[in-house]
Amino acid sequence: MYSQIQEKQLYQSTIDFLSLEKLQAQDYLQAIACLQYHEWKYYVQNEAVISDQQYDLLFQFVKEFEAAHPASIHQDSPTQRVGNDSISEFETVSHLQAMLSLDNTYNLDDLNDFDQRIKKLCSLSSEQELEYLVEPKFDGGSISVVFENDQMVRAATRGDGMRGDEITLNAKTIKSLPLKAKFSSLGITKAELRGEAIISKSNFAQINIKREQQGLTLLANARNASTGVLRVKDPKETASRNLDLFIFQFSFAENQNRDSVLDQFQNQNQSIEALAQLGFKVATVERKLCKGIQQVFDFIQQWVERRDQYHYELDGMVVKLNDFKLQELCGYTSHHPRWAVAFKFQAKQASSKLLAVEFQVGKIGSITPVAKIEPVPLAGVTVSSISLHNEDFILSKDLHLGDTVLVERAGDVIPYIVKSFPELRPESAKAIRFPTHCPSCDSALIKEQDQAAWRCVNPNCPAQLTQKLIHHVSKDAMDIDGLGSSLIERFAELGMIRSMADIYRLDYQAISQLEGMGQKSSEKLKLSIEKAKKNPIHRVLHGLCIHHVGKKVSKLIAEQIHSLLDLQHWPLERYIAIKDVGPVVGEKMLNYFSQVENITMLKEMEILGVNMIQTEEDQAKQISDGVFSGKTILFTGSLQSIGRTEAQELAEQAGAKNLSAVSSKLNILVVGTDAGSKLKKAQEIPTIQIMTEEEFLKAIGK
């Protein structure tokens, strides 16, 4: 980041400035450079070469100069990390590259399986030792940060992996995040980085001490303290938490011609070193290159033992195939990269007493037993309720009311009963009796062959209806903001909602008269419901709560129909013909759309304004009979007639899959003006067809 000469110069400039009474105009930019250097030294290198008092004095000089000359304020000034603007609304923005999750593993056998899968994907010998980069898996909030022309311009939360909430103002308060970095020295004009915002254990302890003194509720754990504060509306609140940001990946980088330039790095470790040189905080002693999976496991075991003494909360280690070319051969699933895996540390455990079991009815009638235990603190949260899944789980764990049980948070997230202690069982302990009839409607329960769950099959079961309504309005389905489970339950109790159609004909005047609601809340709810009526039909289909019909299947079916009501005429064969749907889903769909009351309800919803017709979002992106069907394509250079994004969309509509780099997997390279290294590389691979922009447009009929 800084040479020894630069460090000496900035240190000497700092000392010189501190001898002044105030800054002069000609000193302003150099003073900013000094502050940036000391922030990097303290927050990234964990070293301080001046005292806090000296830093504060120089900071005050800069602040006073800016107050006297507001037109001269430089956007890189550390004073601009916390502005005066609060955030009124978080805008949702698209990531430049999808933020995928990681597959999980918990032991050496799983790691060996991961290693062997990679070797098969890369057509390598099972005996060959691969190089892996092992990094800490920080327990914080994942964010993406975008730089343009060396300037930090945007930060966003992970969100759903494709889109997240913009948190730029809050991210600027993180002092280990440079507001400016010389990406231009690497030929990069636009870059997107992945990082984890976290709070050190010592900072977290101090935060809770202050909250206790102020009579505030204590924060449960460091993870919640960091993720929650990323989305507060006042950046000053984010600043007060003293977050750190560790950067762990270059996800996107392009030059002025909008060509990807990530291929200048040969491997993961090299790209991380480049980020460190640019001034970003990266894992150093916590990161290691390992030769072979046994070395990976040995290094992880070291961190299992060091975990509790480390400055930050870790919930595991991330193992990444180091070589970028091999990563490309491995590829991705829709959920995670095949070349990386998270080794999760064993969950922390505690014992408690099993007090009672409640039996809850789900949206498809499944009966779920829920254990009520004596509240116990576990891995930063207090646990008092735990799902027991089904009757077989209760029997396999030999659970009795009154038992002492061992509890853990599986993956440090979901509470789980590991086992009971029969040797500690009191004489008053009682066996858990699974109900034979529905706790809600008293209908006899049934268990289908090869199924673990007991189910209530009464279509008019009140508990089922309520759960279906809660699912229908949820974010994954119709996404009706402001209509949560508590309001659904309240409206159902009052008789205001008896079916899904009733949601779209609510009496807003009556709602405004309810305690705790009012006119403003009623109008806001109406706007949310009116917005939901325009949803694509794949959301409507998912919101119907048909067994086995989730988000993915709903989209696959929605691609094949014009109207949702077309499905009342579909035979089983139509469902089976859709890849990844199959006969089980087909039977459930046939059953649902053969029932008159369901069709009647859907027609009611349509009359009430709910969209039942295929939208653009419902349509398949890949065209099976397109001119580029089954082909891979890449654009390089500057396109004259259309933008790069539009060209990629047109290629997809013609059946092609867009790639980001030249390799043997590429079929077509479309060349614009000022094409660079990608053209030269493609010319060396005889199987790649090189097309001009005009030829591409002509091929797709434009």
Image (spheres, rainbow, N blue to C red):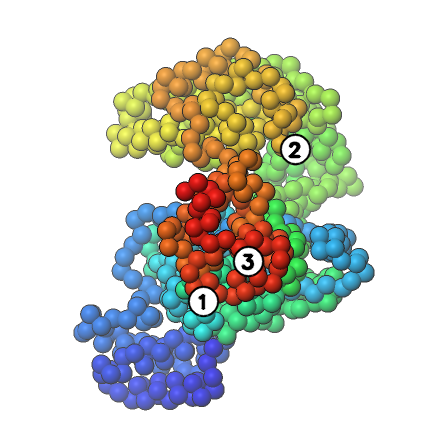
Type of amino acid under label 2: His
Q: Is residue 674 left or right of residue 357?
A: left
Query: Residue 329, located in which quarter of the rendered image?
Result: bottom right
Identify the residue at image location x=67%, y=30%.
Answer: 390
Q: Which residue is mark 1?
A: 188
Crowd class of label 1 (few under 14; some 14 to 19; many from 20; radius 10 Å): many
Across and down, in percent, residue 21 comes to 24, 85
**Secondary structure type for disc 1:** loop
Amino acid type at circle 3 is: Ala
The quadrant the C terminus occupies is top left
- How many residues crowd around disc 3 within 10 Å: few (fewer than 14), some, or many (20 or more)? many
Please, what secondary structure does the residue beneath circle 2 have? loop
The residue wearing badge 3 is: 661
Q: Nearer the viewer, residue 33 or 136?
A: 33
Q: Which of the two discs, 3 and 2, labels the residue nearer the N terminus?
A: 2
- Residue at horizontal 55%, vertical 35%? 625
